[in-house]
Each structure stands twice: as structure tokens, then as C-alpha cells.
Image (tube, helix red, strand yellow):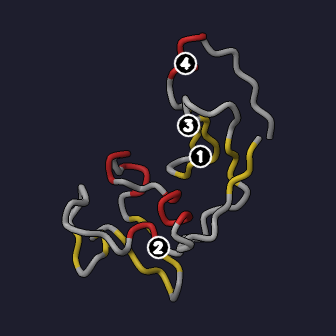
Amino acid sequence: MRVELDLPDWVDERHIRVHAGIELVAEKLSFEKSWRVKKDRCTRCGKCCQGLDDTHIYPVVNGECIHLEKIKEGVYNCKIALYHSRACGFDPRIKIAKGECPITYERG
């Protein structure tokens, strides 16, 4: 899918993110010249909601967000997915950088 937008000049000073539901699809950070576009869909492995500490916005039990629901082995859902705050810290890039998430982005 190709999307073209004419945005005002002032947005060049801001981060721009495109989501499909809660899933980050593309982003252009204010200090970067090009976009990063997601190559892979989320596998729902749940790793982004595991290994958390008590500074997480939602309650954490044994390192997992209480809203993480195991569907079957290796497949999880967020019980509040579309309703969770962006402040929940759901940012797969941190787990990607650590090699804990299989999602990849390419420069557009």
C-alpha cells in the first residue's frame, strides 16, 4: 500500500508515526532524513510485554504485564490492546535492539 500526504512544514520538527491499530507500521524521527517501514507483522510472541519491572504503567506480576494473555504456546494477546495508553511503553524497537523480537524495519 502506498500513502501520500501533504503535511505542513512544522511537522518536520516532530516524530511522525503510522500505526495499524496498535501496531507501529512506519516512522520518521525528527532527526532522521528517511522513514523506517516495518517489514514483518507482529508474531504476538509476547516478549514486548515480558521482562518488565514495577515502573511499567500497568501492574506487573513476575515480570509480565497483567494484561498479557497467553492464547497458546508462543502466542499472546494484550487484553486491552486497542484501549491501552501509548504510555504503556509498548515499543518493540527496544526488544528488537536486544535481539528479543523478530520484527525488522527497512529504510524507505
Between circles 1 and 4, the one closer to the viewer is 4
SS state under label 3:
strand
Numbered mark located on residue 7 in the image:
none
- Callout 2 crowding tier (Cα within 10 Å): few <14, some 14–19, many ≥20: some
**Disc 3 residue type?**
Arg
Dividing the picture into quadrants, the one containing residue 70 is: bottom left
The first of marks 2 and 3 along the sequence is 3
- Give the residue number, with chain letter if any, for mark 2: 46
Given contact means CB atoms under 8 Å apart, are the residues at marks 2 and 3 in contact? no
Dot 4 or dot 2: first in sequence order is: 4
User: What's under tag 4, amino acid-wise?
Assistant: Val
Residue carrying label 3: 17
* Extreme-bottom residue of the structure: 73
How crowded is the residue under tag 1: few (<14 C-alpha within 10 Å), some, or many (20+)? few
Please say if 41 is above or below 11: below
Judged from the image, the secondary structure of the residue bearing numbered disc 2 is: loop
Q: Position of residue 29 (x, y in %)?
A: 56, 35
Q: CA distance from mark 1 to mark 4?
A: 20 Å
Q: Earlier in the sequence, mark 1 or mark 4?
A: 4
Q: CA distance from mark 3 to mark 1?
A: 10 Å
- First in residue order: circle 1 vs circle 2: 1
Q: Are marks 1 and 4 in contact (CB under 8 Å)?
A: no
Inter-mark Cα distance, 4 to 2: 33 Å
- Circle 1 residue: 20
The x, y position of residue 90, in whole percent, is 42, 56
> Mark 3 and mark 4: span between their CA atoms?
11 Å
